[in-house]
Image: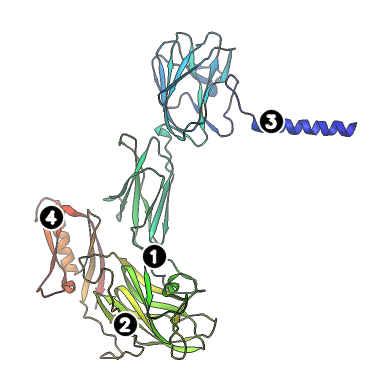
């Protein structure tokens, strides 16, 4: 009998506990604090706009020791909120109104405050709304007492614009920047602005975003960007703008290898391939896979999405048997392939003993593609991974010959033992000397034009720009293309228009 009574008592306790966990207050009951899943706002919240004869009425029975009260007909309380549910909390008494109107997004309902006396009653609730912004208007209909003490909405909801909390995350990834943010007040759309200078000028990169996340893939690695987000209401009015957020997209790396992996968008092709050990396996950021040529002499070509300034490459490779492998590197510059390294010999381990080889220095320069000629002698040519000594990344500009998608020789003939005019010194075009700079002019269309100029030419451009900004000078400025002059012309000049320039950047360097 005792055992049975104990079981019954435990069952009752479990039942009571369960009921307590699922209990939710009903209209007409007291609710002195918000339940789980709700958050409470006081009647004094500045986002609630009162019109008419509302007044503060103090008392210990009320939430935060006071409430709003009126006895006039046609008085209103208006507020916006973001969420999927709402409750009205206030006092009740037998002298209170029988009909207080409430409109949510124009849908009219009413509720009563006429019941036994007491404070903090749940007098109205609306559940299962669409989780979005809603407009609420409460209107009095009688000369009897009407009151508002507190408003409960969804736990993660917002009440009006003043509740905007700037929650912005800016995450750099290789060749992209991910932005995500929290709801900003009454905003229904967002714009993303970007600059390469703190404080601007800014360029709008996307408009009318409805989602709270955006991925900017039109970025250059190693380049610092500044972002700001603007929020607009459904009438197109700007209601909020964030501060600047700075970020620099990185390149990916491979453990134990120097430099960086080729940028996202790089394509690979080889003169020959064995089975599924294709050229792209040398770019997959894994040392466990490889490109295998199935022949001793072959070449691997990498075409970049943007021109890269670089000064070395490094390879991870493996052969069967252990072999002294010769590597020769060629670079595509201004549409022409040029040998950029001497023949470099590396000892490559046998079988599965993949080895990261000593890096191969190349002629420092800006290249849109590279080709690696491999002579593995008694083994098959293969490469597990390639990393690059990237110093900077430059945008493709169709006005510059050789920076479009490369069109290399369709039938390259690898030459493991090239015989240049001077075998000890790679052939290289003559280079200008002295103090110089890379001038990058960004137009209002987003196009970036790059010029390799002397500092005298750069200073002349800056003087013209500042003069025109002050109201004097010509509308356009001619920039000499120098070594980029291709064709039967004595000179080629690029004319930039002042009111088309968004910003410009000067990167100085010196050559001997």
Question: Alpha-carbon neighbours of circle 2 within 10 Å: few (<14), some, or many (≥20)?
Answer: few
Q: Disc 1 or 2, which lies upstream in sequence?
A: 1
For the N terminus, the image quarter is: top right
Gap between marks 4 and 3 measured at Cα: 78 Å
In the picture as drawn, the residue positioned furthest to the right comes out as: 1
- Check the image and report above or below for 159 versus 499: above
Q: Which label number is shown at residue 264?
A: 1
User: Which comes sooner in the sequence, label 4 or label 1?
Assistant: 1
Residues under labels 3 and 1: Cα distance? Answer: 56 Å
- In front: 359, or 293? 293
- What percent of the width, then of the height, locates residue 404? 26, 68
Secondary structure type for disc 3: helix
Q: Dot 1, how many residues are within 10 Å of its Cα: few (below 14), some (14-19), or many (20+)? A: some
Q: Residue at x 40, y 39 (%)?
A: 184
Pick whichever of labels 4 and 3 is earlier in the sequence. 3
User: Label 4 crowding class (10 Å Cα cut-off): few <14, some 14-19, many 20+?
Assistant: few
Separation of marks 4 and 1 at Cα, in angstroms: 41 Å
Residue 128 horizontal/vertical position (percent): 51, 31
| Residue at 17% across, 64% down | 459
Q: Nearer the viewer, mark 1 or mark 2?
A: 2
Query: Which element carries disc 2, helix, strand or loop?
Result: loop
- Can you identify the residue that label 4 sits on? 467
Instruction: Find residue 19 and name its label.
Output: 3
Q: Which of the 4 image quadrants contains residue 20?
A: top right
The residue where tag 2 is placed is 412
CA separation in Å, label 4 and label 2: 52 Å
Among numbered discs 3 and 1, the one appearing first in the sequence? 3
Tell me: residue 23, above or below residue 62.
Answer: below
Q: Earlier in the sequence, mark 4 or mark 2?
A: 2
């Amino acid at each position: 009998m005792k055992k049975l009574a104990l079981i019954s008592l435990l069952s009752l306790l479990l039942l009571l506990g369960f009921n307590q966990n699922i209990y939710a207050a009903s209209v007409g009951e007291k609710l002195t604090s918000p339940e789980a899943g709700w958050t409470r706002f006081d009647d004094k919240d500045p986002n609630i706009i009162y019109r008419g004869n509302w007044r503060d009425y103090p008392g210990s029975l009320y939430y935060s020791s006071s409430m709003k009260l009126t006895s006039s007909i046609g008085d209103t309380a208006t507020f916006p909120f973001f969420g999927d549910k709402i409750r009205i909390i206030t006092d009740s008494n037998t002298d209170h109104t029988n009909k207080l109107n409430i409109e949510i997004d124009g849908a009219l309902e009413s509720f009563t405050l006429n019941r036994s006396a007491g404070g903090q009653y749940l007098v109205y609730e609306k559940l299962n709304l669409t989780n979005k912004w809603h407009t609420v208007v409460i209107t009095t209909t009688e000369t009897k007492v009407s009151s508002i003490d507190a408003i409960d909405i969804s736990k993660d909801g917002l009440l009006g614009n003043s509740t905007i909390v700037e929650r912005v995350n800016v995450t750099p990834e290789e060749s992209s920047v991910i932005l995500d943010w929290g709801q900003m007040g009454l905003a229904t759309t967002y714009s993303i602005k970007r600059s390469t200078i703190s404080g601007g000028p800014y360029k709008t990169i996307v408009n009318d975003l409805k989602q709270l996340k955006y991925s900017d893939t039109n970025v250059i690695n190693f380049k610092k960007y500044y972002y700001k987000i603007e929020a607009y209401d459904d009438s197109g009015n700007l209601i909020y703008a964030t501060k600047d957020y700075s970020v620099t997209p990185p390149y990916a790396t491979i453990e134990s290898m120097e430099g960086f992996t080729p940028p996202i968008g790089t394509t690979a092709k080889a003169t020959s391939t064995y089975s599924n050990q294709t050229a792209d396996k040398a770019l997959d950021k894994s040392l466990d896979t490889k490109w295998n040529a199935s022949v001793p002499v072959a070449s691997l070509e990498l075409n970049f999405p943007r021109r890269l300034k670089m000064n070395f490459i490094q390879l991870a490779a493996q052969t069967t048997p252990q072999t002294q492998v010769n590597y020769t590197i060629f670079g595509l510059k201004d549409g022409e392939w040029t040998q950029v390294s001497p023949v470099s010999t590396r000892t490559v381990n046998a079988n599965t003993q993949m080895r990261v080889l000593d890096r191969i220095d190349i002629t420092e320069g800006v290249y849109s593609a590279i080709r690696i000629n491999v002579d593995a002698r008694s083994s098959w040519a293969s490469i597990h991974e390639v990393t690059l000594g990237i110093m900077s990344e430059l945008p493709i500009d169709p006005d510059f010959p050789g920076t479009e998608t490369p069109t290399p020789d369709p039938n390259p003939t690898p030459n493991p033992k090239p015989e240049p005019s001077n075998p000890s010194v790679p052939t290289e075009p003559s280079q200008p000397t002295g103090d110089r700079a890379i001038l990058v002019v960004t137009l209002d269309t987003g196009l970036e034009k790059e010029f390799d100029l002397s500092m005298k030419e750069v200073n002349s451009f800056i003087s013209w720009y500042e003069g025109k900004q002050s109201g004097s000078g010509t509308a356009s400025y001619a920039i000499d293309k120098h070594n980029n002059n291709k064709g039967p012309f004595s000179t080629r000049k690029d004319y930039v228009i002042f009111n088309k320039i968004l910003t410009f950047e000067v990167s100085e360097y010196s050559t001997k």
